[in-house]
Image (spheres, rainbow, N blue to C red):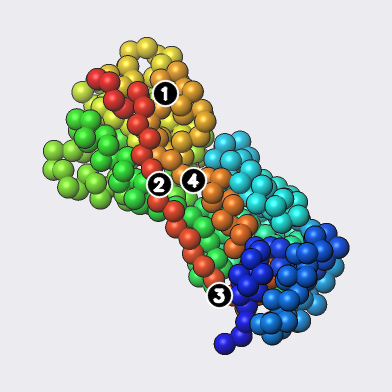
Amino acid sequence: MSVSVKDVAARAGVSVGTVSNVMNWPEKVAEGTVRRVQEAIDELGFVRNDAARQLRAGRSRAIGLVILDVGNPFFTDLARGAEDKAAQAGLSLILGNSDEREEREATYLELFEEQRMHGVLISPFGDITARLRRLRARGIPAVLVDRTSSDPSFSSVSVDDVAGGSLAARHLIEQGRRRIAFVGGPMKIRQVTDRLQGARDAVARHPDVSLEVVETRALSVIEGRVAGAALLERRPEDRPDAVFAANDLVAMGMLQALNMHGELHVPGDVALIGYDDIDFASAAVVPMSSIRQPSALIGQTAVEILLEEAADPALGARHVVFQPELIVRESTTAR
Ligand code: RIB
């Protein structure tokens, strides 16, 4: 079986990124480390994948990251985790914001290909499989963050959003809520439909609990406000006693609408839970319960995988799925 870059790293007691640096930029690595890595290469008989190395020759010392919404702290936390891990390997991070627009997404992927980035991380909006294959053909590895690809040959780092949706709904049911509204959208976003599916799975086990869906045009504060205002226009008997917002931005908008109106109290009249557990959730006027995603860890893990694949393109794809965590605060507890 061929010796991989991971075997060399283990033998030398360094990270895969360090092995990559020794092979590509030895002048940037301590002499003792270079010697240890070279000894491990010699002892194991590691043979570099020269074709891929040629392709990577002259590669930039930067990783490209395309996120969906730079205004969403979930993605900036993810970018921070990715940047910290990239810096440990002596690389920079170039951030692109697709703004959930396919033409912008394509522009960044073209730019990162032209610049022969060290690798690309992306939270995709459209179907980008063909573009990812182009990058791979140019020796540029790509890893999906917070999403998975229709092509499983591309590694991914994501969270089990179905489990997260179930956690949120079960918590509301345990708090005695019986008329739940799921607020989020558009339904083309896989995270939204997975979270909704999880909520449906939880509610299905409770015949006395109802679940309605209020679809929004985006996962934003404004859309949360619009949905909150619409709930307030209903007759009292038609209103939910709990809202599961598909992410914290929608939940923040919902909270603003209910608070401004003043007629409905959170959580007394309506319990409210969000998703992501961004910093604003705990700092909200009514500290918000949420489903925590390890956003920085997602970014760090994606960079680790990317560096390993950049150093050894023969490595097979890996799909890391983290488990979400329920964070309980005032917006769902007191009655
Ligand atoms: O794309 C928007 C949402 O998806 C974020 O809020 C985060 O939940 C991500 O998974």
Can residue 114 be seen by looking at this rendering?
no
Instruction: Name the residue rendered at 71%, 78% in the picture.
Output: 41
Mark earlier in primary sequence (4, 3): 4
Residue closest to the eye, 141 or 70? 141
Res. 22 mark:
none
Would you name the residue on which mark 3 appears?
Answer: 316
Do the CB atoms of the residues marked 4 and 2 lie less than 8 Å apart? Answer: no
Res. 287 mark:
1
Q: CA distance from mark 1 to mark 2?
A: 19 Å
Q: Quadrant of the C terminus?
A: top left
Q: CA distance from mark 3 to mark 1?
A: 43 Å
Q: CA distance from mark 2 to mark 3?
A: 26 Å
Task: Establish whether ligand 1 lies closer than 8 Å to the Cβ of label 4.
Answer: no
Asked which secondary structure carries label 4, the reply is: loop
Neighbourhood count class around disc 1 (C-alpha, 10 Å): few under 14, some 14–19, many 20 upward: some
Residue type at the position of mark 3? Gly
Asked which secondary structure carries label 3, the reply is: loop
Residue type at the position of mark 2? Pro
Res. 324 mark:
2
